[in-house]
Image (cartoon, rainbow, N blue to C red):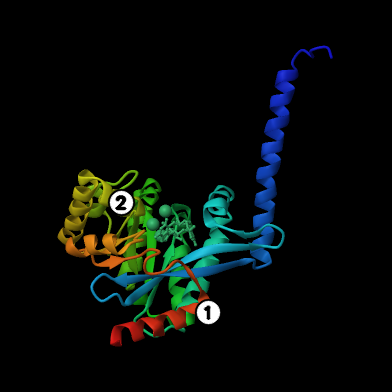
Amino acid sequence: AKAMPGSGFRFFDAALAADVQARSAIENDLARAIRAEEFFLEYQPIVGVESRTVRAFEALLRWRHPEKGRIMPDVFIPAAEKTGLILPLGNWVVREACREAAAWPAPAGVAINVVGDQFKDRAFVGYVKQCLMETGLAPGRLTIEVTESVFSVDETVIRESLSELRSHGVRVALDDFGIGFSSINNLRAFPIDQLKIDRSFAQAMMESKRDADLVDIILKLGRTFQVTTTVEGIESEGQLDFIRQRGASEAQGYLISGPVAASDVMRFLSQSDDRLSA
Ligand code: C2E
Ligand code: CA
Ligand code: CA
Ligand code: CA
């Protein structure tokens, strides 16, 4: 066939159009799925390093897609953020997590992941308070997890929102700490209660002295700022021992348990009571 002048451009246009189409397909699908209530939460326990008893469960969002099956958050959260659908979806997570956690025996808490755009919606903090009131969950049993990327949203908005949540009794955790734009300044400037050390460290600290030292420093930082320190991604007894020796407060990871269905939370809590009294 004869080469068509400009066909390269046409091909490029077509690829771009297909990409745009694929993207708007997941966007439309997301909007539909929110209406159809295809989302649900799983809960991963966070335990005290010494006691091994459950302190809280982190709520992790899943999408039960009618054709594609279960879709994980790394796939759809970015799309939800891009389209603004993170606002209704994020609100749904807050309400659902509060509702489910209110049925758990105190003091077991619940932690939810919140992104910067949710704070741009000035109604968000009020919405959280309203969910606490309506479900009867004590504010001290709720933790809001944010990553350091929230600080790229208007600093004043973030500072005010986090302060207001904390003065209401809600806890604030800095998630995935140690990677990306970690800064001691974030600890100084923003009110937080907990540092969650990124799970990449759990592996790296066993393999390199430098990473072990870094974990040590972060744990010391946590003590200096008097915040709870939680190490994510604990998969072996060796890792748990390691962080126990270095004074971490809490552990989360497959060694303790992966995320479980909401219906298994109560069973998990009573089993860990058995373990404790055994
Ligand atoms: P994250 O907040 O860092 O959540 C922890 C992720 O690590 C979860 O993946 C969890 O299943 C996984 N994990 C837990 N223990 C281990 C372990 O021992 N080893 C390994 N290799 N992985 C472990 P998941 O559920 O796929 O969530 C991925 C990310 O999606 C979360 O990372 C969080 O950033 C985001 N996400 C989940 N739910 C929500 C939500 O409701 N809202 C928002 N905005 N983001 C969410
Ligand atoms: Ca998290
Ligand atoms: Ca994390
Ligand atoms: Ca993460």
Residue highlighted by disc 2: 201
Q: Residues within 10 Å of mark 2 (few under 14, many from 20)?
A: many
Q: In the image, what residue type sits under mark 2? A: Phe
Image disc number at residue 263: 1
| Above or below 22: residue 86 | below
Q: Residues within 10 Å of mark 1 (few under 14, many from 20)?
A: few
Distance in Å between CA atoms under marks 2 and 1: 31 Å
Residue 194 shows up from this direction: no
Screen quadrant of the N terminus: top right
Q: Nearer the viewer, residue 152 or 210?
A: 210
In which of the image's four quarters is ligand 2 placed?
Answer: bottom left
Screen quadrant of the C terminus: bottom left
Left or right: where does residue 243 sit relative to residue 44?
left
Residue 50 location in percent, x, y? 23, 73
- Look at 34% across and 53% down and name the residue there: 198
- Of the image marks 2 and 1, the number of the one nearer the N terminus: 2
- Look at 32% across and 52% down and name the residue there: 203
